[in-house]
Amino acid sequence: MTTLDFEIAKPKALPQIPKPCGWRVLIAMVPVENKSAGGILLPDSHLDQKQAVATIGYVISLGSQAYQRDDTGNQAWVRPGDCVLVAKYAGQRHDAKVKGESVELRLINDDEVQAVLQDAGEDTPSWVLDLIQKSGVYASWRG
């Protein structure tokens, strides 16, 4: 198999932002830098290793039943825009294009959010706000 064949066989980015169902939460993972501090492009094998341990992301949207159980106190632990820590292998992974860049999206169970790292607000990156807006929850994300 040639490199060209592999590139053709790669899955395409999602045409739209998925809406989580049930108790799922959609997380946009923080992209891994593809250049060293000196500006050298890193090989794909190195990026794959870094991506495998990347566990920080931003909440984009929540399914209608997320955190709606007695064991969660019937209230959401997170909201769109929150920066969170998730388990390394949690969720189903998809790619999406945001402003020409590839971003990994994960659909995870609501109980796989390990911690909230910061409050939503002015520090939320613009690409996250774009994803939240595209997901259709923009009007109520600061709830």
Image: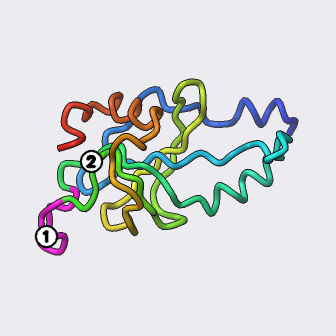
Q: Secondary structure at mark 2?
A: loop
**Residue at screen point 12% across, 72% down:** 70
Residue type at mark 1? Gly
**Circles 1 and 2: CB atoms closer than 8 Å:** no
x and y, in percent, of residue 72 in the image = 19, 70
Disc ID at residue 21:
2
x and y, in percent, of residue 135 in the image = 32, 33
Residue at which label 1 appears: 73
Which of the pair 123/77 is nearer the observer? 123
Please report the bounds of the magenta region as a residue range. Answer: 66-75
**Residue at screen point 59% across, 24% down:** 100
x and y, in percent, of residue 45 in the image = 80, 53
The quarter in which the C terminus is drawn is top left
- Would you say 92 lies left or right of 77 here? right
**Residue at screen point 86% across, 39% down:** 1
- Write down the quadrant of residue 16 in the picture: top left
x and y, in percent, of residue 126 in the image = 45, 32
Our reading of the magenta stretch's main secondary structure is: loop
Name the mark nearer the viewer: 1 or 2: 1
Which of the pair 127/17 is nearer the observer? 127
- Would you say 111 lies left or right of 90 here? left
Q: Secondary structure at mark 1?
A: loop
Marks 1/2: CA–CA distance: 20 Å
Q: Residues within 10 Å of mark 2 (few under 14, many from 20)?
A: some
Residue type at mark 2? Cys
